[in-house]
Image: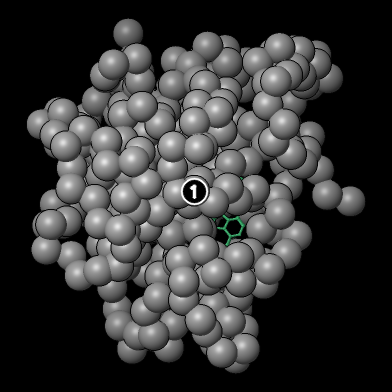
Amino acid sequence: MEKAEHAALFNYKGYNLAKETMKLDLVEALEDFETRDSDIFVISYPKSGTIWTQNIICLILYEGHRNGTENISISHRCASIEYNIYNVDITQMPSPRVLMSHLPYYLVPKKLRGKKGKVIYVYRNPKDTLVSFFHYTNSFRAVAFNLEEYMERFLTGNVIGSLVFDHVKGWYTHQNEFNILFLCYEEMIQDLRGTVLKICKFIGKELSSPEVDKVVEMSTFKNMKADPRANYVKTYEECFGQKNVKHIRKGTVGDWKNIMTVSQSERFDNIFQAQMKDIPLKFIWDIK
Ligand code: A3P
């Protein structure tokens, strides 16, 4: 039996959603969801840098977000198409809409798959994703998982988002069906300005050099953690009654080394090799 409601899963067509949060009618309607050419979908496996990417895009697109004159949180600005916890009327959102999703490639709107709308897919080395997800999940729980227990769930896909390898592989191998930009979390850490410029180019938004500087400054870990529009503190309180969730937690590369034992790391590596051997995506496990 699950120890906390948050861990409860709802399997929809082979993919695990958060049972307590998802809305089945919303998910079932997604196949025929009307996308617009100008739509920007931030898509990822959970704990891979989703909110960071959403925030960067909001800072690029909205001057009021950048200069602080607008106090709209990114959970309102970028609704999730499968959860939409604030019931944002997505059909009435002005273009360009920024939307987000953790869905696998085969469950997103049919038209997005036909290149109507853009996808920014962010991925991260899955050991750090595991560690981030582990801390996040435990922050909802009365009785914490230990890493061994959680790793077992993660490596068998018994978590929200299902198996990380399937998610990344699916999006990577079907990339030709989408208008898609891949971002790597660790490269975002290594070169935030370069990432901002890459996103600007992909979404067709030109900013002046000082504006780019401002986006970079406001999307650093420290500044995002302090920004109530971006740190999700209020969202967890309002929507889940949770005061202890630190979504913007540590923001580093290689945190897995601080918690995984050698044998856990080796086991992970073996599974990773077997699962990802045909996928030429670059993974960065540590930054010196
Ligand atoms: P950690 O738990 O390792 O700190 P997601 O939004 O997909 O759930 O990803 C959450 C992860 O992204 C967390 O990782 C969080 O700290 C990290 N993150 C969020 N904003 C960041 C930023 N500006 N710089 C670096 N990491 C960031």
* Residue at the spot 37% in from the left edge and 57% down from the top edge: 40
Residue 191 in percent (x, y) is at 73, 64
* Residue at the spot 31% in from the left edge and 35% down from the top edge: 108
Is residue 94 in view? yes
Is residue 146 in view? no
User: Does the residue tagged 1 have its C-beta within 8 Å of any atom of ligand 1?
Assistant: no
Residue density around tag 1, few if under 14, some if 14–19, many if 20 or more, within 10 Å: many
Residue 257 in percent (x, y) is at 79, 34
193 w.r.t. 126: above or below: below
Q: Quadrant of the N terminus?
A: top left
218 w.r.t. 120: above or below: below
* Residue at the spot 71% in from the left edge and 54% down from the top edge: 187
Left or right of 40? Residue 206 is right
User: Colour scheme used in the picture?
Assistant: one colour
* Residue at the spot 72% in from the left edge and 31% down from the top edge: 280
Secondary structure under tag 1 reads strand
Residue 117 in percent (x, y) is at 34, 53
Residue ID for mark 1:
180
| Front in this rendered view, residue 71 or 237 | 71
| Front in this rendered view, residue 66 or 175 | 175
The type of residue carrying mark 1 is Ile
10 w.r.t. 128: above or below: above
79 w.r.t. 28: above or below: below
